[in-house]
Every structure is written in structure tokens, then in C-alpha cells.
């Protein structure tokens, strides 16, 4: 599975080194690289956003100027892209090329193997925002504050019972732009404080978007460690992976898409796949699994469910499951942009204004992704069509021109909406099986029916 989002581009004509790289196919899966033997080849790769190149390793032997003119050309079109100079014969490099002002991130001398490239990639993309270093912020506690809504992101209240001290500056939201700070970073977290808010029906605590990045790193670390342990229950693992996904999707929705966030999304999708695998090993019933864990946060839950369904439909490769999972994470991104109050999807259908927003959200979502560039067209199309169905009586929704990925997101969406509804009853479950599921392709219907009926132990 890929360990970072996107790819590295290696521009080199050193035959021995290129052959060495190709010998590491396993490592190449985890750290995807594209190889170019000439600068013109590299240039055409760089021009295509779909390749999502995030770092360039440029060999000094590629041109007359030891890489200087190539560096200039790269920086003209992609000024932020890190470029590392690879020198197989450092003694030949002019001294003036070695200063930091030249523009190379660093010079890699005589790399002996692909592992050297990998360690540079790891260093470059490792999470830098540690959660341990958050300081108390200047806002006063326990008074009403006016703060910009988009700067504060909801996190689930339940997470805060896990640590003895608050790692963050924590707020509750009273209404649009109105907040109260209830904790400073470093404050002792008293259990009764959290319980008090839970009793008042407060579900979310808010932290600043900046601090939330660090919070995601904390969730990622906790969840990764738990997944690796054999003595931890599947439900416990799932809860943490779901929490990580929830935070990542909130972060993507509230503050827009960036390569850094897609890196974190990639980590969630990797964890989500390893959780799915553990479920298969234990042959856990999806139905009882869903009853035991709370999959309240819509996009991340849809992502996880879609991955499981994709696997049941027969998609085996983790690459495709990740693509489906990613589509799940962003499928409603247009909805949040059209209406940042984030109501439950079903709530939009109750008023004509809501209906209008609902009708536009899928198309808008696809537009956001396409304008960002670099997303697989399958993902854009899936987002665009996720409310269409292959069968059924509603001619406004019915189309024969729909692919399996889109149907997987569609069914995961319906399933999550049903399970998370406050008025969920077993009758609604029957309704889902009788009236909603048959609108999908027989393949999907069969897979979901099987998943929901799978016995706990064979
Ligand atoms: Fe939707
Ligand atoms: Fe949805």
C-alpha cells in the first residue's frame, strides 16, 4: 500500500542506478515513483496533474548544466515542488551549486540504492505537526467569544475522555460565530466536565483548524498502534479508525483539499483496509459490527462501508478499494460547500430550499474535485452520480449508464443514512432491504444482502 499520497519523480540516465530501483518492486509499491530518462520525458509527466508528483529527484548527469537549467524550468511551473539533486559523481559538481540559495532542497551524493531515495521521501512527508506542543491560547475562558466559524472544527466529545490533560484549546459552539472556551491546552481534564456537556446534549467540542491538524496526528498514532495489537477488540480498533476518518473528513470539508491532507486521508484509508482485513479474518458479521460501533460521521463511515462492499463485490486490490474509500470520503463535499451548516443529508429533502441544495451537491462536488486536478476521473464521476440508480421506479434517478464504483458509494450512502438516523428501527432495515437495495445492480444487491446476513462465526 502506498505510504504517501502522490508519487516521486526520478529523472536520471544512470543505467545502473535505474536498474537498482527497478529491483525494489515491493518498495516501489509503498513509495510510488515514476522514472524518466530524459528531461523532456520528465516534463511531460510533470505537466499532467493526474500523476500527482510531489518531489523530484533530479540527476546532475541529465543535462549540460548539472541540473541547473532543469531546476529553473521545474520551478517556473511548480515553484513549491521540492527538487533534490542526485549526484553520482559529486567531485564533478561546481562548488557554486552547493549553496542552499541555488534552489535544490538538498544534494544526495552517490545514492547506493533505492532505499536512500525512500528515506528522503519518508523524511519529507512525515507528519511535522506534533500534538504534544500545543500551548494555551490567549482567549479568555468561560465568556462568550466571537470567532470565525471556518477556523474551528468539530471533534467528537467522546475522544476527550482518553487523556488526563487537555492537549488542545477547546471550545463549545453556541451558534454562528459564537463560542465559549472551556479548556486551555494543558488543563487537567476532569471527567465530570465532559459528562456535564454530554448531559447537555453537546456532541462536539471545537478546536482551531491549526490545532486540529495536530489532533489528527494524535488520532493516527493512537489508531495505528491499536491496530497492531492482537489483544485489542475489533470494535475498539474500529472506533479509533472511524474517529481518525471522521476528523480527516471534517478537515477536508471545512478547510479545502491539499496534498498534506490527502497524505493523512491516505493513512486513514490504509488503516481502514487493515481493519477490513481483520474483520474478514475474524469473519465478523457486518450487521453486528455496525450495531456495536457508532458510525455517526457520515463521509468516513460511507468510506469504510464502501470499502467493505467493494471487497465483497470482488474488488481485491487495495489500490481500487482505496479509490472507492476516497470517493466515500469526499462524496458529499459539494453539500458542505453549498451549506456549511452541515445538516444530515435527509434533512435537505424536507424543504424546497433544501431540495435545491441537495439537487446541486453531487454536480458541485465533482466540479470541486475536477478543478483541483489530480483526481482520478472515476472518483469525480462517482461523486457526480452517487444519487443515481441503475433500477427503480424513479425515472429522474434511473440510468443504465452507471459504473460499479458509483453504485458502491450509493449503497454505502443509503446504508449509513439508515443506520445513523435517530429514528432507526428494525422495520427501516427491512424497508432498506425490500425497497432501496433492489434499485442497485443485482451484483450489489447480492453482495450487501450477504454482508448483512453473514453469520458471526462459521
Ligand atoms: Fe450525497
Ligand atoms: Fe452522502
Image: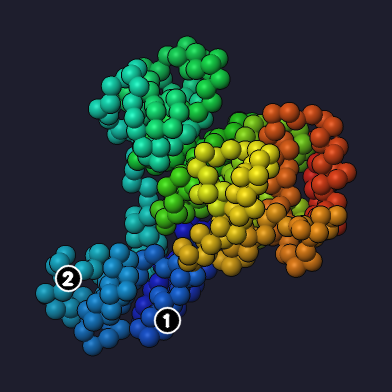
Return the residue nearer the eye: 14 or 78.
Answer: 78
Quick one: SS at disc 1?
helix
Residue 101: horizontal and vertical position, in percent? Answer: 15, 67
The picture quadrant where one finds residue 428 is top right
* Res 263 visible: no
Q: Residues within 10 Å of mark 2 (few under 14, many from 20)?
A: few
Return the residue nearer the eye: 19 or 178.
Answer: 178
CB contact under 8 Å: marks 2 and 1 = no
Residue 413: horizontal and vertical position, in percent? Answer: 69, 47
Q: Is residue 233 above or below residue 268?
A: above
In the displayed structure, does residue 128 sit left or right of residue 341?
left
Q: CA distance from mark 2 to mark 1?
A: 24 Å
Q: Residue at x 28, y 79 (%)?
A: 73
Q: Residue at x 33, y 19 (%)?
A: 143
Q: Is residue 458 above or below residue 24?
A: above
In the displayed structure, does residue 37 sit left or right of residue 229?
left
Amino acid at each position: 500500500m502506498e505510504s504517501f499520497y502522490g508519487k516521486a519523480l526520478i529523472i536520471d540516465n544512470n543505467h545502473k542506478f535505474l536498474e537498482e530501483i527497478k529491483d525494489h518492486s515491493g518498495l516501489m509499491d509503498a513509495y510510488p515513483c515514476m522514472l524518466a530518462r530524459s528531461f523532456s520525458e520528465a516534463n511531460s509527466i510533470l505537466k499532467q496533474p493526474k500523476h500527482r508528483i510531489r518531489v523530484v529527484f533530479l540527476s546532475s548527469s541529465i543535462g549540460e548544466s548539472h541540473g541547473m537549467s532543469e531546476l529553473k524550468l521545474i520551478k517556473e511551473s511548480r515553484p513549491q515542488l521540492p527538487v533534490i539533486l542526485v549526484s553520482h559523481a559529486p567531485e564533478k559538481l561546481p562548488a557554486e551549486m552547493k549553496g542552499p540559495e541555488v534552489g535544490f532542497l538538498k544534494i544526495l551524493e552517490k545514492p547506493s540504492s533505492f532505499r536512500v531515495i525512500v528515506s528522503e521521501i519518508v523524511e519529507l512527508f512525515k507528519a511535522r505537526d506534533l500534538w504534544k506542543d500545543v500551548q494555551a491560547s490567549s482567549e479568555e475562558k468561560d465568556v462568550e467569544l466571537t470567532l470565525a466559524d471556518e477556523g474551528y472544527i468539530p471533534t467528537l466529545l467522546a475522544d476527550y475522555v482518553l487523556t488526563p490533560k487537555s492537549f488542545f484549546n477547546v471550545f463549545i459552539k453556541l451558534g454562528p460565530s459564537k463560542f465559549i472556551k472551556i479548556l486551555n491546552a494543558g488543563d487537567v481534564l476532569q471527567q465530570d466536565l465532559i459528562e456535564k456537556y454530554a448531559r447537555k446534549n453537546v456532541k462536539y467540542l471545537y478546536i482551531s483548524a491549526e490545532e486540529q491538524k495536530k489532533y489528527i496526528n494524535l488520532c493516527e498514532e493512537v489508531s495505528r498502534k491499536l491496530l497492531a495489537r492482537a489483544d485489542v477488540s475489533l470494535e475498539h480498533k474500529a472506533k479509533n479508525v472511524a474517529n481518525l476518518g471522521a476528523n480527516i473528513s471534517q478537515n477536508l470539508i471545512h478547510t479545502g483539499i491539499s496534498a498534506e491532507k490527502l497524505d493523512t486521508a491516505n493513512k486513514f484509508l490504509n488503516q481502514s483496509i487493515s481493519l477490513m482485513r481483520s474483520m474478514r479474518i475474524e469473519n465478523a458479521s457486518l450487521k453486528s459490527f455496525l450495531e456495536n460501533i457508532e458510525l455517526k460521521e457520515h463521509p468516513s463511515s460511507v468510506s469504510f462501508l464502501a470499502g467493505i462492499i467493494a471487497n465483497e463485490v470482488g474488488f481485491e486490490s487495495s489500490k481500487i478499494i482505496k479509490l472507492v474509500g476516497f470517493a466515500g470520503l469526499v462524496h458529499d463535499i459539494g453539500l458542505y460547500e453549498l451549506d456549511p451548516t452541515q445538516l444530515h443529508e435527509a434533512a435537505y429533502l424536507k424543504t424546497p430550499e433544501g431540495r435545491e441544495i441537495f439537487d446541486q451537491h453531487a454536480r458541485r462536488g465533482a466540479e470541486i474535485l475536477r478543478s483541483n486536478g489530480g483526481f482520478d476521473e472515476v472518483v469525480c464521476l462517482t461523486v457526480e452520480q452517487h444519487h443515481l440508480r441503475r433500477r427503480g421506479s424513479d425515472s429522474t434517478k434511473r440510468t443504465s449508464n452507471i459504473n460499479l464504483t458509483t453504485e458502491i458509494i450509493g449503497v454505502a450512502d443509503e446504508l449509513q443514512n439508515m443506520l445513523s438516523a435517530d429514528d432507526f428501527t428494525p422495520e427501516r432495515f427491512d424497508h432498506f432491504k425490500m425497497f432501496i437495495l433492489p434499485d442497485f445492480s443485482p451484483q450489489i444487491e447480492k453482495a450487501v444482502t450477504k454482508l448483512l446476513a453473514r453469520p458471526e462465526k462459521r
